[in-house]
Image: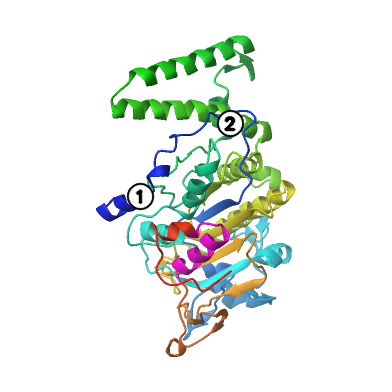
Amino acid sequence: MDRRTFLRAASSFAILLPWAGQKAFAQNQPLYPGPFLLCIHAHGGWDTTMFFDPKTSYEEKTINRVCLENGIQTLGPFSYPASVQYRLSPSNPDSLVLHSPEDFLNRYRSRLLLLNGVDLQTNAHPVGEQMTWSGHGASEYPSIAALLAIKASRNFDLPCAYLANNGGYVKTLGLVPLTQVNDAQRIREIANQERFPVAGATVDLFSEQTSRHIRQANEKRIQHLNQQLSLPESKNALGHYQKALLAKNGLGPLMDHLPTPTITLNALRPGAGSALNSALQQAEMALYGFNSGTMASASLSLGSFDSHSNNDNEQLLRLGYLFVLLEYVLETAETLGLRDKLTVVVGSDFSRTPLYNSENGKDHWNTSSYMLFGPGISGNRVLGATAANQHPEHVNPTSPAQRLHKDAGGIVLKPSHVHHALRRVLGLAEFNSNFGLLDRDIQLF
């Protein structure tokens, strides 16, 4: 962290020590009501021409073989490769269908805002991830999910304010604790350390009365140590320990909500195996964490999009998994009553080059897309665009659905424009003073 970033972070000192001045996690404490944010990262760089920014060829050079063979279909403002299905084995036309862009649009286009032609200004993975999820690439910035967790933690005691595990760019700059757990069973073990697995079941190590006495003794010991300690380092360490104990005690509402057994890919697509289970279970923890009022934001990641060889088959499979995950998130959010409180953002490091390389793969390309859903985000819209050669188009800043030549005032969409809008709809514009964004807010949504 450079000096400027440190001073910026230090100016928010009231939230730099998240345990300072917080109350114990009481059973009757008010639960966080939202808004909530779920960021889904397609790790490695997705091929946007394989879903909602399709291309065929340019100057007699093939950009997408699937589109060239089958054509391009439209549905409302959206375009997608005609007749494509995301199969478990993309080269086998008889293998299990995971999803398709047409089916996804038929079900969710009324809620989907698609941003195409977003220039990430890099083809390096770390910078692309940071640009996608913080809106800034020049220095260390908190992710957008971290900003929401920071704000939520000011007024609510959240044991898992920000859940992240391999979720792309998830930096917090120490302004809010980051919970990195990808297995609901680990959460249960943390919350119930006095239970022990025996022969497939769990037994209580102590009676409820004994457990209560242990907790009371811990509290008295912490109070005594706090009175005895004088060194700031020692008090700081004790604060961390106390915060961990309080957070463990606050996990009860989440434990009451988490379903058993956990979600699996086979439950959604029988016969599809287990490759998506980790991401699905992270999404499940996030959604039920939101519903229990114990979390504010989460960052999830789905990997293996970096298709430098065998691009088409790799992308078709990974996009199938991504669309299954996204369908699960949207459907479960609806079931839990989170639709009007939850913002879902899907992005990637960048996209793939227009042309294939010698190994039938595609390399890194700076122009990418976002998919967004949530309150304050009007769906059934496509903003921004790419040209036939997959370069970003200049658009009208007052009406980004329209192309406008740069000499007439047209601009290229950038992550900073996206994050201006996200901060506004999530109530995070206050962070613009400490973590400012380049470019102006063009009211994307």
Q: Give amino acid for label 2.
A: Leu
Q: Is residue 81 visible?
A: no
Give the main secondary structure of the magenta stretch.
helix
Q: Which residue is mark 2?
A: 251
The quarter in which the C terminus is drawn is: bottom right
Instruction: Name the colouring of the figure.
Output: rainbow
Q: Give the labeled residue for mark 1.
A: 9
In this orientation, which residue lies closer to the viewer: 243 or 95?
Answer: 243
- Estimate the x, y position of residue 350 in percent, counting from the top left: 44, 64
How many marks overall? 2
Is 424 one of the magenta-colored residues? yes
Residue 225 part of the magenta-drawn span = no
Q: Quadrant of residue 16?
A: top left
Callout 1 amino acid: Ala
Residue 38 higher or lower than 425, as above or below: above
Which residue is depicted at the point 29% across and 50% down? 1
Boundaries of the magenta span: 414-429
Q: Determine whether 107 is above or below 224 in the image.
A: below
Label 2 crowding class (10 Å Cα cut-off): few <14, some 14-19, many 20+?
many
Compared with 385, 206 (above or below) is above
